[in-house]
Image (spheres, grey):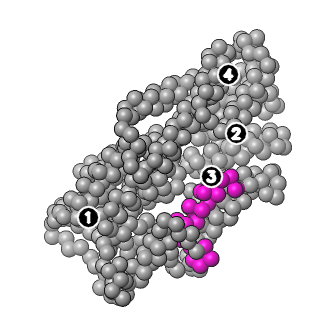
Amino acid sequence: MNGLKGKSAQKRCFVVMGFGIKTDLATGRQLDLNKSYKVLIKPVVESRGLTCIRADEIRHSGAIDIYMYRELLDADVVIADISTANVNAFYELGIRHALRRRTTIVISEDKLAYPFDLNHIKITSYTHLGSAIDFEEVERFRQVLGETLDSVLQAEDPDSPVYTHLHELIPPSIRKKAAKVIRELNAEIRDAMDEHKPGSDGDLSANPSLSLLIDRGEYALSERDYPAAKAFFGSAIAEMNREPDHKYTYDPYLVQRLAFATYKAKEPDNVSALKESIRLLNLLDLEHTNDPETVTLAGKAEKRLYEAEADEQHLQKAIEYYERGYHLVQNRYHGINLAFLLNKRVATRLYPETTDKIADMVLANRIRKKVLALCEENWNEIMDKENKATTPSPQGDQELSSDHHVARDEQKFWILVNKAEAHLGMGHFDEYEKAAEAAKKIAHADSMWQAFSEEVTELKLLMKEYGHLLNLNGLVTA
């Protein structure tokens, strides 16, 4: 009993943030918010003796919203990460500021445009590399967040703008059944913490947490066990909707991961899996959504359906989705794929007039010019970070350092092959060879080079056949 009492009395920190991989619309970069939580936030909170919990880690028998609202009221500290301008995080931050006068910390990735309505609130920033976080940045931010936590726990002045400006406002409290609610919530948190202890496999048979299901799904993806990943992400969606009277909701990240695992699993066959992937993405209002991840996955699936069935309508849909993604976030990935698909459309009957085919060729190369500029910008960012990286890997963070180097090499590889493909499409054959040779020298998976080789082989044939439309005939040979 004494042990349980001690656990119940332990202060807790509730972390408000999105989960999974999100696209920052302001920069077009993908940010792994799970990595931000597990590497930057949770270790610091726990080092201060607080229980650290995020909504997806709580096992629950009812609607998760109930637990979220309770935590926003009762948690000793709330850390709100508003990276990627996550609307749910903003909403929950606003609720916390209305419910509690103090002990709220706001953080974000450093490229977040400072919202006007938050210009009077301190936002502690960290630098995210997208799929990885530099270990020097981990050390720096952990120290800053730790000092911020120490200060917030000791301060008496309000950090909520609501209570700062409305001096006579009294914070609310739940009086009815308050003790029972707190006991139940503490039990849920203890279960979640026990489940996530190092070495614990967790129990998937009896009410697993959302976090555990997502972790298992991501691990299955990393191992290329796509059928297992499909099962885990399907279960995660079901876990979010277990309450019988709860309106069924589809979290975009979970649906996206399920759609990705579905078409990669190729069950019962490739075409059926691709069409099921599109059906899943339609749950996210595919025809109208401005979510870059959703339209990107749809573009991939339609592109593969065109390759499998030779139905030109699949090519047209793929172009529409990549085009929408490119206009939403002008990054290298969307640009290089859109340019390639525009060249492929030249070889179809979709637009039979010569002037239309010339228009597609011109547009493709305009996009490639932008891709080359983005390649240069992205490469310089990586080189600047490498030149500044003089600190050895922090003790205990060798795995993080290794992950960082792998992610950095992958970024370098894709920058160089994007650069090579852009030069090839524009008829700059010498520059294509130079960039391709540089990419070969960077550590990469065989599948990455195979994907690049297949695409440029097809692009060479397209340029040989239709390069004369831009006076490029003869510059590229098969």
Residue 246 magenta-drawn?
A: no
Which is closer to the viewer, label 2 or label 4?
Answer: 2
| Residue where numbered disc 1 is placed | 103
Task: Tell me how far mark 1 sits from mark 4, CA to CA.
Answer: 55 Å
Marker disc for residue 404: none
Mark 2 residue element: helix
Q: CA distance from mark 3 to mark 4?
A: 32 Å
Say which residue appears at 53% left-offset and 69% top-offset: 200
Q: On the picture, is 353 further left or further right than 360?
A: right
> 344 above or below 22?
above
| Sooner in the amino-acid sequence: mark 1 or mark 4 | 1
Residue 425, numbered label = 4
Percent from the top left, x then y, of residue 393?
Answer: 41, 43
Disc 3 from disc 1: Cα separation: 37 Å
| Residue type of the residue flagged with mark 1 | Thr
Left or right of 285 on screen, residue 398? left
- Kindly tell me whether residue 58 is visible in this rendering: no
Query: Mark 2 — residue?
Result: 447
Bin the neighbour count of mark 3 within 10 Å (Cα to Cα): few under 14, some 14-19, many 20 and up: few
Q: Are marks 2 and 4 in contact (CB under 8 Å)?
A: no
Q: Residue at x 57, y 37 (%)?
A: 410
What whole-number distance in Å separates the C-alpha atoms at marks 2 and 4?
Answer: 22 Å
Residue 33 is situated, as x and y percent measured from the top left of the image, at 47, 53
Mark 2 / mark 1, whichever is N-terminal = 1
Residue 222 is labelled as 3
